Image (cartoon, rainbow, N blue to C red):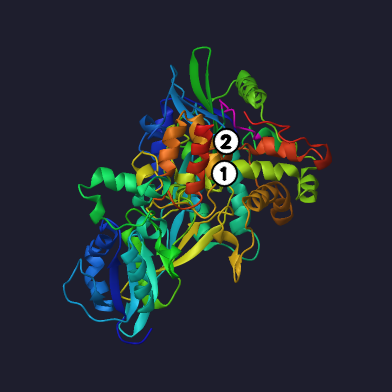
C-alpha cells in the first residue's frame, strides 16, 4: 500500500446491512478509522463517491441475482484487496435456505407479481465467484474483529482472527460450560470464535452465527445434542441457520434430512 | 508438623488471619451453577452443604443436608487461572513523542488459595517444574507462585470422574502446601484436623487457639482417607503405558476416538497441567501495542501452523498428540506424568470422552483389538 491513505469501498449485496453498520458502530474508533483511511465509497455512510480503483473493498451480502454475478466481478477488478463481511457474504446467509428448496415456489407465495422478480435459484457466498483475500464471519460481524482487520491492514501484518472453536474463547473467559453444566444445546464446539462467546456468557447456547470452526465435527455434535434430548428436526434447523450452506454445516443438515426420510 | 484440632467456627478466624497477613483469599464458592474458586471474604462464602456430581460430559451441583464446608470435589477451573491466567498482558508499548514507552506486567497481589485438593497441588507442582525449572524461568508465573499461600483440604467425596490414586497424585495431600486441613463430620461431631507444613503456614496458625489431638484423631483421619481411596473406581494402568502409546501411533482406537472428538479444546482449557500459550500483538490505530499471552490448545489447527501450513491436519493426530504427551512423552520432558487424575477433561468434554477408557483400549495390542471393544457409557 502507498503512503497515502488507502481508499476504502463498502459494497452491499443480498443482506440486511447489519455488517456494514458494524463499521459505523465502531463509535469510539470511527473517527480514527476515518482518519486512517479514505472512505471512498460507502453509500450507507455518505453520498459522496470517489471513483475507483480502490485499495480495499469490504463486501457484505451474498450473490442472489444475475446482476450480482456481474457486479461482484467488476468489484474484484477495481479492488486491490477484497474482504467479505458476515455470514451472507461468507456462506450465502439465511437466504441460502432457498438452496435447499424451490425458489419459484417462494416467489409465487411472497410476491403479488412474481414475473417481475429476477433471481437466481440459489444464494452463494462471494468466494464462489471471485478470489477473496480475507473473510470475516458472523451474523453480524464483530466490530472488534473488523477493527483488527483494518488496523492489521494499515500495519501490514496478518490479522489475528482465530478459526478455532467458540469453546476456546468461552473458556478463556472462564465461563462455566452451558452444555455440560446446564444441559443447554450449544453449537460452541463446532462454531468459529469471534463473538467473544457472547451467548454462552449469558447462559444460552451458541447457535452458530460465526459458521463452522476449522475442524468442526458436526456428526459428533449431532450425537451430543441427541443425548441432550434435542429432536433431529431441531438439530437440522439449527445447522441450517445463517451458515446453513457452508460445509460442514450443510452436510450435517443434509445427513439429518436423509436420516429423516428413511 | 504437629496435628491439631480446629473448630468449625475457627475456619473464619483462619480466613481472617490470612487476610490480615496481606493475602487475597481465594476459595470455593457456588457461582452460576458450579463451584468456582473466587475471592472470598469469610467462611460464609464457602459452599456449605453443596456437593458436585461429575460424569463424562455432565456436571451438576446438589444441595444436601450437611454442614460440611468442603463436600464438593473439584471446580471447573483449577487454580491455574490465578497462577497462569488465561489472558495475560505481558507488556504495553505506547508511543511517546519520538520514542516508545514500555510498561511491563507486574503483579503485586499475594494469593492465598483455600481448598486446594491433592490432585490440584500435584498439578501446581507439575507447573512449577515447567515454569520455574530449567534455564528459562517464567517470571510472570514466578511472582504469582512464590507469594502464594496454599491451604490444602483433603477430599471427603469423590466424583465418578476422579482417578488421582492410580496416577499417584492423591488422595493424600502431597508435600508443598503451607497448611493442610481435614474436615471431619461424623458421630455428631464437626471439626478440622489441621497442620502447617511451612513457616508461613505456622505463623498463620499461631494466631488461632487450636486444641491438641487425641490418639483416635489419627485413626479417624486415616480411615476417612481410605474410604476416599476405596471410592476411586476409575483407574489408569500406568505400568508399561508409555511404550504402549509410543509404539502404537496407528492403533485403530485413534480413529474411533477422533470420530467423537469435537476438537473444541475444552479438555486442554480445563486441564490443570496444560501449559501451552500463544502470543499476540494487539495494535490500536494510534500505533500503540500490547502483547498478550493467551492459553492455546494442541487441538486447534493453528497450533502447529508453520511456514507452508499446519502439521497436524487430522483431529486424530491432535488427539494422539495430546494423550501421548500427557502419559508418555511428558515423562521424558518433565520426569512425571502430565495427568493428575482430576477428571476435568472427562467432565467438560461435551461428548464425554474418557481418557481412562481410551488408555485402556489403547493398551490392547492393535492386532487383538476389536472395534468398539471398550465402550463408552
Q: Chain of mark 2?
A: B
Q: Residue at x 57, y 23 (%)?
A: B213
Mark 2 residue element: loop
Q: Is residue B95 above or below residue B67?
A: below
Subunit that carries the residue with mark 1 = B
Count of marks, rendered view: 2
Percent x, y of residue A77: 38, 78
Q: Residues within 10 Å of mark 2 (few under 14, many from 20)?
A: many
**Local crowd size for mark 1, using a 10 Å CA cut-off: few (<14), some (14–19), many (≥20):** some
Q: Please name the residue shown 53% across and 40% down the image.
A: A255
Q: Is residue B238 left or right of residue A216?
A: right
The residue at which mark 2 appears reads as: B352
Q: Is residue B102 visible?
A: no
User: Tag 2 or tag 1, which sits nearer the N-term?
Assistant: 1
In the figure, is residue B285 to the left or right of B222? left
Quarter of the image where the N terminus of chain B is located: top right
Disc ID at residue B198: 1
Where does the image place residue A26, in percent across and percent down from the top left? 25, 63
| Image height of B227 relative to B106, above or below | above
Q: To which quarter of the image does residue B307 belong?
A: bottom right
Residue nearer the viewer, B316 or B106: B316
Q: Is residue B184 above or below residue B274?
A: above
Q: Position of residue B302 (x, y in %)?
A: 55, 61
Specify the segment rendered in magenta.
Answer: B156-164
Q: Nearer the viewer, residue A208 or B151?
A: A208
Residue B346 appears left or right of A10: right
Q: Is residue B334 above or below residue A227?
A: below
Amino acid at each position: 500500500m502507498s503512503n497515502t491513505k488507502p481508499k476504502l469501498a463498502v459494497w452491499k449485496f443480498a443482506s440486511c446491512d447489519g455488517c456494514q453498520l458494524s463499521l459505523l458502530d465502531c463509535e469510539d474508533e470511527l473517527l480514527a478509522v476515518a482518519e486512517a483511511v479514505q472512505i471512498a465509497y460507502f453509500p450507507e455512510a455518505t453520498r459522496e463517491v470517489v471513483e475507483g480503483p480502490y485499495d480495499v473493498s469490504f463486501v457484505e451480502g451474498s450473490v442472489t441475482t444475475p446482476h450480482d454475478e456481474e457486479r461482484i466481478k467488476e468489484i474484484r477488478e477495481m479492488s486491490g484487496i477484497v474482504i467479505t463481511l458476515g455470514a451472507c457474504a461468507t456462506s450465502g446467509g439465511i437466504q441460502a435456505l432457498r438452496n435447499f428448496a424451490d425458489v419459484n415456489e417462494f416467489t409465487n407465495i411472497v410476491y403479488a407479481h412474481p414475473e417481475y422478480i429476477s433471481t437466481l435459484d440459489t444464494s452463494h457466498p462471494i468466494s464462489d465467484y471471485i478470489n477473496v483475500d480475507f473473510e470475516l464471519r458472523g451474523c453480524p460481524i464483530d466490530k472488534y474483529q473488523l477493527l483488527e482487520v483494518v488496523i492489521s491492514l494499515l500495519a501490514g501484518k496478518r490479522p489475528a482472527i482465530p478459526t478455532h472453536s467458540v469453546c476456546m474463547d468461552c473458556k478463556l473467559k472462564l465461563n462455566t460450560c452451558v452444555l455440560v453444566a446446564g444441559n443447554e444445546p450449544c453449537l460452541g464446539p463446532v462454531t468459529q470464535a469471534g463473538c467473544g462467546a457472547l451467548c454462552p456468557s449469558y447462559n444460552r447456547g451458541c447457535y452458530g452465527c460465526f459458521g463452522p470452526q476449522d475442524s468442526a465435527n458436526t456428526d459428533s455434535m449431532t450425537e451430543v445434542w441427541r443425548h441432550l434430548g434435542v429432536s433431529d428436526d431441531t438439530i437440522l434447523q439449527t445447522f441450517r441457520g445463517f451458515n446453513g450452506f457452508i460445509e460442514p454445516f450443510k452436510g450435517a443438515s443434509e445427513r439429518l434430512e436423509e436420516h429423516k426420510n428413511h | 508438623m504437629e496435628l491439631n484440632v480446629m473448630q468449625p467456627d475457627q475456619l473464619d478466624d483462619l480466613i481472617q488471619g490470612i487476610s490480615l497477613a496481606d493475602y487475597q483469599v481465594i476459595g470455593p464458592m457456588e457461582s452460576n451453577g458450579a463451584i468456582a474458586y473466587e475471592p472470598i471474604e469469610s467462611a460464609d462464602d464457602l459452599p456449605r452443604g453443596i456437593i458436585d456430581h461429575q460424569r463424562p460430559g455432565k456436571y451438576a451441583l446438589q444441595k444436601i443436608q450437611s454442614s460440611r464446608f468442603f463436600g464438593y470435589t473439584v471446580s471447573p477451573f483449577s487454580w491455574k487461572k490465578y497462577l497462569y491466567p488465561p489472558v495475560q498482558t505481558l507488556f504495553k508499548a505506547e508511543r511517546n513523542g519520538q520514542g516508545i514507552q514500555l510498561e511491563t506486567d507486574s503483579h503485586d497481589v499475594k494469593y492465598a488459595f483455600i481448598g486446594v485438593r491433592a490432585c490440584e497441588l500435584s498439578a501446581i507442582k507439575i507447573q512449577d517444574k515447567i515454569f520455574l525449572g530449567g534455564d528459562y524461568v517464567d517470571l510472570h508465573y514466578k511472582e504469582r507462585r512464590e507469594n502464594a499461600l496454599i491451604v490444602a483440604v483433603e477430599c471427603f467425596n469423590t466424583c465418578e470422574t476422579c482417578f488421582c490414586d492410580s496416577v499417584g497424585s492423591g488422595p493424600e495431600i502431597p508435600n508443598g502446601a503451607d497448611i493442610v486441613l481435614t474436615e471431619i463430620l461424623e458421630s455428631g461431631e464437626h471439626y478440622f484436623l489441621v497442620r502447617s507444613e511451612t513457616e508461613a503456614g505456622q505463623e498463620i496458625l499461631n494466631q488461632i487457639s487450636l486444641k491438641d489431638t487425641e490418639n483416635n484423631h489419627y485413626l479417624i483421619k486415616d480411615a476417612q482417607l481410605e474410604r476416599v481411596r476405596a471410592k476411586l473406581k476409575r483407574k489408569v494402568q500406568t505400568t508399561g503405558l508409555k511404550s504402549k502409546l509410543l509404539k502404537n501411533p496407528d492403533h485403530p482406537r485413534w480413529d474411533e476416538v477422533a470420530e467423537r472428538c469435537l476438537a473444541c479444546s475444552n479438555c486442554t482449557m480445563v486441564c490443570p497441567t496444560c501449559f501451552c500459550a500463544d502470543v499476540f500483538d494487539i495494535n490500536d490505530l494510534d500505533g500503540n501495542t500490547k502483547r498478550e499471552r493467551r492459553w492455546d490448545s494442541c487441538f486447534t489447527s493453528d497450533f502447529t501452523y508453520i511456514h507452508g501450513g499446519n502439521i497436524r491436519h487430522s483431529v486424530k493426530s491432535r488427539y494422539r498428540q495430546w494423550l501421548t504427551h500427557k502419559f508418555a512423552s511428558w515423562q521424558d520432558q518433565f520426569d512425571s506424568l502430565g495427568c493428575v487424575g482430576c477428571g476435568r477433561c472427562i467432565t467438560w468434554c461435551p461428548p464425554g470422552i474418557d481418557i481412562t477408557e481410551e488408555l485402556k483400549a489403547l493398551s490392547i495390542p492393535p492386532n487383538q483389538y476389536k472395534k468398539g471393544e471398550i465402550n463408552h457409557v
